Image (tube, rainbow, N blue to C red):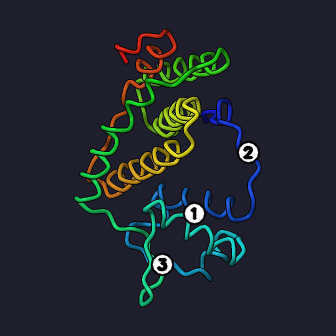
Amino acid sequence: MLDTDAYASPAPPEGKAGVAERALRSAIVGCVLMPGERLSETSLTTEFALGRGAVRAALARLKASGLVSSTARSGWEVAPISAAEIRELIAARRHLDPILCSAALDDAARRRLTTLSQMHMALLQRPDLGGDVLPTIRRCERDMLDLLVNALGMPVVAGFLADLWDRSNRLVNFFERSGRAKFLPTRFSSFAEALVEGRTADA
C-alpha cells in the first residue's frame, strides 16, 4: 500500500459548507455520483453525514462550477457528460494551462515541486501501474498543479483552473470506469522540472 499522505497538500480550515462541497465534489469527480444522476438533498445529508443547509450551499457552489445542474421541475442532477463539454474543456485548458509557466516560485515552492516531481518520475518507472499506483500518480500531478496555480497569486484564475481540472478528471474517471478507455499518465514531472530549473521555454 502506498503512503499517499506523505506528500498531500495541507488543507486549510473549512466551514460546514466547505466540507460539504469538498465531499460532494470528490464524489462527483470520482464518479461515485455518476453523470446524469438525480440528487436528493435528504439522501446526500444521510449518505455523507452532512447538514441540510451545508448540502444546499455546496450544491449551489458546484452548480457554479458546472458539476451539477438544477431545474424547478427535476431538482438537482449531476451534470451529464457531452461532446460539447469535452470540446469546451480541451479549448479552455489549451488557453489557460500555459499560464502556469509564469508562476513565481520561491525557494520553498521549488523544493516542494522538486520533491513531487521526483516522486512522480519514480512512480512512472513502476512496471505495473495497477492498484494504488495510478491514482497516486494522478494525485501527485494534481498536487503539482495546485502548487503552481497558488504561486500565480491570481485567486480568480486559480478557481477557474481548479474547476477545469476537476471536470477533466471527471471525464477520465467516467471513461475508465465505463471500460471505454484507459488513460496513461503524462510525463508531468518533466514539465515541473523545467519550471524549477527556469527553463520556461522547454516547459
The residue carrying mark 1 is 24
Horizontal and vertical percent position of residue 167: 41, 53
Q: Which amino acid does label 2 sit on?
A: Pro
Horizontal and vertical percent position of residue 148: 53, 29
- The image quadrant where one finds the C terminus is top left
Marks 2 and 1, Cα distance to the nearest angstrom? 17 Å
Tell me where residue 12 sits by quadrant: top right
Q: Residue at x 34, y 35 (%)?
A: 184
User: Is 16 left, or right, of 70 in this rendering?
Assistant: right
Q: Mark 2, mark 1: which one is toward the viewer?
A: 2
Q: What residue type is labelled 3?
A: Trp
Q: Which of 10 and 4 is in front in this view?
A: 10
The first of marks 3 and 2 along the sequence is 2
Q: Which amino acid does label 1 sit on?
A: Leu
Label 2 crowd (10 A; few <14 / some 14-19 / many >=20) = few
User: Is 170 left, or right, of 43 in this rendering?
Assistant: left
In the rendering, which numbered label is found on residue 76? 3
Horizontal and vertical percent position of residue 52: 68, 78
Residue 55 vertical position relative to residue 102 in the rendered view, above or below? below
